[in-house]
């Protein structure tokens, strides 16, 4: 019984070490990618007011999930004022790159997608950091269980 408990404690400690390393990697990746996203968005230096947003957030630079969501929704509203859908814009015809209305709509769609991908990316970094934090907590719990099992195995000898 003593050898089984000792082997089990080693397995639990190894799993704890693996969970700890994975947790640290997840947290690091989440933090570093969030910083990358924020930095890239800050370099663009686009304020919400440039998109016609008014109110308390108008002077904020688009550099977070919240501001990207506001900006994306604003651009979407502007795009829908041109045409409710892409199909409505074209009216059964093909895209005409010489038509300013078509080009403006396509540019708005592109900007809207960029902003919503930013919102999604911030969400993924949050998930990565939360998952990593949970893995670290699990690693600590596994480490504690492994130590207790090792002590139990020593007492049984």
Image (tube, rainbow, N blue to C red):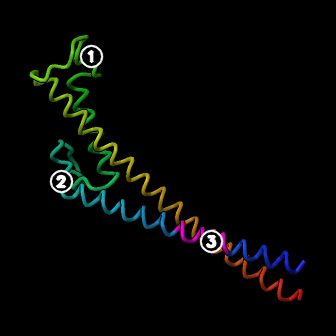
Label located before the other in sequence (1 or 2):
2
**Closest to the observer: 22 or 90?**
22
**Closest to the observer: 71 or 23?**
23
Mark 3 against mark 1, which lies toward the viewer?
A: 3
Which mark is drawn over residue 150?
A: none
Residue 15 is left or right of residue 80, and the answer is: right
Residue 74 is left or right of residue 146, and the answer is: left
Instruction: Kindly identify which residue carries mark 2.
Output: 44
Residue 44 is left or right of residue 114, and the answer is: left
Disc 3 is placed on an element classified as helix
Dots 1, 2 in contact, CB < 8 A: no
The picture places residue 7, in percent across and down from the top left corner, at 78, 75
Look at the image and say whether residue 22 sits in the magenta stretch: yes
In space, the residues marked 3 and 2 are separated at their CA atoms by 40 Å
**Closest to the observer: 62 or 15?**
15
Image quadrant where residue 72 sits: top left
The picture places residue 45, in percent across and down from the top left corner, at 17, 55
Give the answer, above or below, for where 143 lies relative to 88.
Answer: below
Look at the image and say whether residue 33 sits in the magenta stretch: no
Image quadrant where residue 20 sits: bottom right
Give the answer, above or below, for where 96 lies relative to 67.
Answer: above
Task: Name the chief secondary structure element in magenta.
Answer: helix
Q: What range of the chain is rendered magenta?
A: 14-23
The picture places residue 136, in percent across and down from the top left corner, at 57, 70
> Which quadrant would the N terminus be assigned to in this image?
bottom right
Instruction: Kindly identify which residue carries mark 1.
Output: 88
Disc 1 is placed on an element classified as helix
Which mark is drawn over residue 139?
A: 3
Disc 2 is placed on an element classified as helix
């Amino acid at each position: 019984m003593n050898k089984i408990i000792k082997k089990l404690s080693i397995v639990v400690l190894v799993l704890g070490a693996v969970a700890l390393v994975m947790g640290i990697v997840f947290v690091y990746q989440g933090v570093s990618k969030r910083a990358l996203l924020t930095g890239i968005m800050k370099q663009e230096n686009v304020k919400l007011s440039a998109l016609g947003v008014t109110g308390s957030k108008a002077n904020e630079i688009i550099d977070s999930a919240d501001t990207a969501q506001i900006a994306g929704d604003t651009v979407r509203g502007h795009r829908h004022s041109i045409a409710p859908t892409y199909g409505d814009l074209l009216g059964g015809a093909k895209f005409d790159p010489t038509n300013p209305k078509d080009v403006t709509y396509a540019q708005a769609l592109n900007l809207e997608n960029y902003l919503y991908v930013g919102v999604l990316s911030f969400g993924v970094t949050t998930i990565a950091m939360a998952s990593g934090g949970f893995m670290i907590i699990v690693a600590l719990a596994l480490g504690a269980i492994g130590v207790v099992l090792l002590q139990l195995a020593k007492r049984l000898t």
